[in-house]
Amino acid sequence: MSEHIHGAFCCPDHSGQQGARTILSQAEARATRMGLRLTPVRLRTLELLIAAHGALGAYDVLEKLAAEGYGTQPPVAYRALNWLVEHGFAHRIRRLNAFTACAHPSDDHAAAFLICTGCDSVTEAPAGAVTAALTQAADSAGFSMDRATIEAVGQCRACQGANA
Amino acid sequence: MSEHIHGAFCCPDHSGQQGARTILSQAEARATRMGLRLTPVRLRTLELLIAAHGALGAYDVLEKLAAEGYGTQPPVAYRALNWLVEHGFAHRIRRLNAFTACAHPSDDHAAAFLICTGCDSVTEAPAGAVTAALTQAADSAGFSMDRATIEAVGQCRACQGANA
DNA sequence: CTATCATACGTTATATCATAACAGTCAAGG
DNA sequence: CCTTGACTGTTATGATATAACGTATGATAG
């Protein structure tokens, strides 16, 4: 599989350098505030995810890290990625076996992802209402929900136009 | 990994032989009605999923199929499983890299899955409201949703009690 | 200062999940 | 009969992920 299949530029909401800097500085601030060690590999991994404007597979990340002098073996990438996910700096997109930077690293939110089949972009959408509905459905079944994976597959605004 | 890790019996809603027969006959009826060829491998695969009362990995299914004289190689299982999913007889549980029989094969519904971390059971929950909320969230982003993956992780009623 | 301990990083090796590509079988229709 | 299309099976390989172990570094207690 080629380098960053998931990461095109035709879709909105990937706010450009401005947004990237914001996300990164918010993340660094939060790490400091909470005593989390955002080490060089972890930081660099986060930067890569942000720069990708989409989702990256672990091996895509590994390839870049290796090229920059970090470790060359899968656990290097998986550890950094899993740490970022555990601490809310990134999300795992299960449908793509890939990871994406969290667009709102400041709050401990529930997120839904909009995966475009046209341009492979991944957008994080506010999922308060969705999560509420899911919690409700779970409750009805006597199920106590800890967390959820919510991923929509379809076409972003730009790709809908492109196909017309 | 051992045989059918995902498939315990401590949780409800896996209605026992009665339910299994119902699901199976509904599925066969629908296949006939719609001109779908529910061949021996496919039928047997569906039976295995139903009997598992949870989710089975493709290789779990393959092992059983092989033991019964069907093909011994991965594509045999993946083809049957993918066909069942495509035609609404089963669902893929992305978080578990596994498959489960559809509990309501008669209607073309949207489903959410409740995955118990205590007993590895997987329960299919009605997801009308959740899907509606997600569609709404997608619309707000100008995203046209085709389908969705909705999976909740937590504890089923029985396992909540067990941990008290 | 230095012994100890926890955390993180890196490695080798292996496990697990999934599909591409091609060959044989068999029933339905010309 | 013989072609065609759907299905099943195979070999081979690709893609994703983790276990287990050794080393380095930095904080802290003695």
Image (tube, coloured by chain):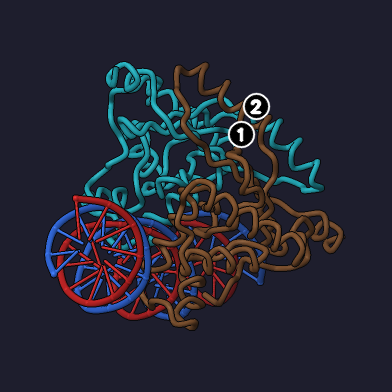
Chain colours: A cyan, B brown, C red, D blue
Asked whether, in this view, residue B36 is left or right of residue A132, the answer is left
Can you say which quadrant of the picture contains the C terminus of chain A? top left
Asked whether, in this view, residue A34 is left or right of residue B65, the answer is right
Amino acid found under the numbered disc labelled 2: Gly
Above or below A131: residue C10: below
Q: Position of residue B81 (x, y in %)?
A: 46, 60
How far is mark 2 from mark 1, CA to CA? 7 Å
Q: Which residue is mark 1?
A: A110
Q: Report in which chain the residue with disc 1 lies.
A: A
Q: Secondary structure at mark 1?
A: loop
Q: Report in which chain the residue with disc 2 lies.
A: A
Which quadrant of the view contains residue B18? bottom right
Q: Secondary structure at mark 2?
A: helix
Above or below A63: residue B118: below
Cβ atoms under marks 2 and 1 closer than 8 Å:
yes
Amino acid found under the numbered disc labelled 1: Ala
Closer to the N terminus: mark 2 or mark 1? 1
For the question of whether residue A69 can be seen, the reply is: no
Please name the residue shown 33% across and 18% down the image.
Answer: A158
Front in this rendered view, residue C4 or B23: B23
Q: Which residue is mark 2?
A: A128
Please name the residue shown 66% across and 56% down the image.
Answer: B23
Front in this rendered view, residue A163 or A98: A163
Above or below C24: residue A9: above
Q: Position of residue C17 (x, y in %)?
A: 43, 62
